[in-house]
Image: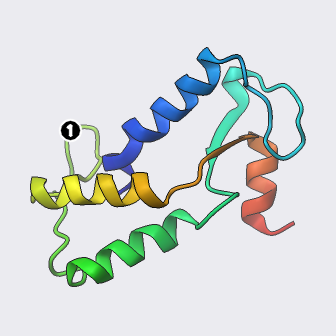
Amino acid sequence: MRTEIQPQVNTYYESRKASHTLVSDESGQPLAPDDTHVSYFRGPRFHDISMEFVQAAGGFDVVALTSETARGLALFTDRTLAERWHAHHQEHAVLGLLWAKENLRRLRGC
């Protein structure tokens, strides 16, 4: 499901870069483009957003994904459902920028 919304994440990062606001939303420190993570740390977790969508759609039996694409990344087989997922993610995701180490520390619960 992440593969489907990756363009939204990329657009968020590029908009921050274009507006010269590549700073950590946690520490306020300037970020290096090659050490930056787009994170869900300020709002619902990706897992929560995706599970809410799956439940509303009728469960995992309804949300069928391709087995694997050439790059090994699964996509929705139902493109109408994929568009609904894109809209759901856009509505609920609260993205922010972090240093990679800040994000990984947060994910480990340290």
Q: What amino acid type should be assigned to the residue bearing mark 1?
A: Ala
Whether residue 15 is situated above or below residue 73 in the rendered picture: above
In the picture provided, is 84 more to the left or to the right than 25?
left
Q: Name which quarter of the figure residue 61 lies in.
A: bottom left
Mark 1 is surrounded, within 10 Å at the Cα level, by few (under 14), some (14 to 19) or many (20 or more) other residues, namely few
Residue 62 placed where, x, y %?
15, 77
Q: Give the residue pinned by disc 1.
A: 70
Q: Assign a secondary structure to mark 1.
A: loop
Q: Farthest residue in the front direction?
A: 91
Whether residue 74 is situated above or below residue 11 in the rendered picture: below
Residue 78 placed where, x, y %?
9, 59
Residue 44 placed where, x, y %?
59, 67
Query: Which residue occupies 63% across, 62% down?
Result: 43
The answer to which of 59 and 90 lies nearer the viewer is: 90
In the picture provided, is 26 more to the left or to the right than 7?
right
Query: Which residue occupies 20% across, 55% down?
Result: 82
Query: Which residue occupies 62% across, 55% down?
Result: 40
In the picture provided, is 37 more to the left or to the right than 81?
right
Query: Which residue occupies 48% across, 40% down?
Result: 9
Q: Name which quarter of the figure residue 13 lies in.
A: top right
Whether residue 14 is situated above or below residue 96 in the rendered picture: above
The answer to which of 63 and 94 lies nearer the viewer is: 94
Residue 48 placed where, x, y %?
50, 73
- The quarter of the picture where the N terminus appears is bottom left
Task: Tally the marks.
Answer: 1
- The structure's colour scheme is rainbow
- The quarter of the picture where the C terminus appears is bottom right
In the picture provided, is 103 more to the left or to the right than 49?
right
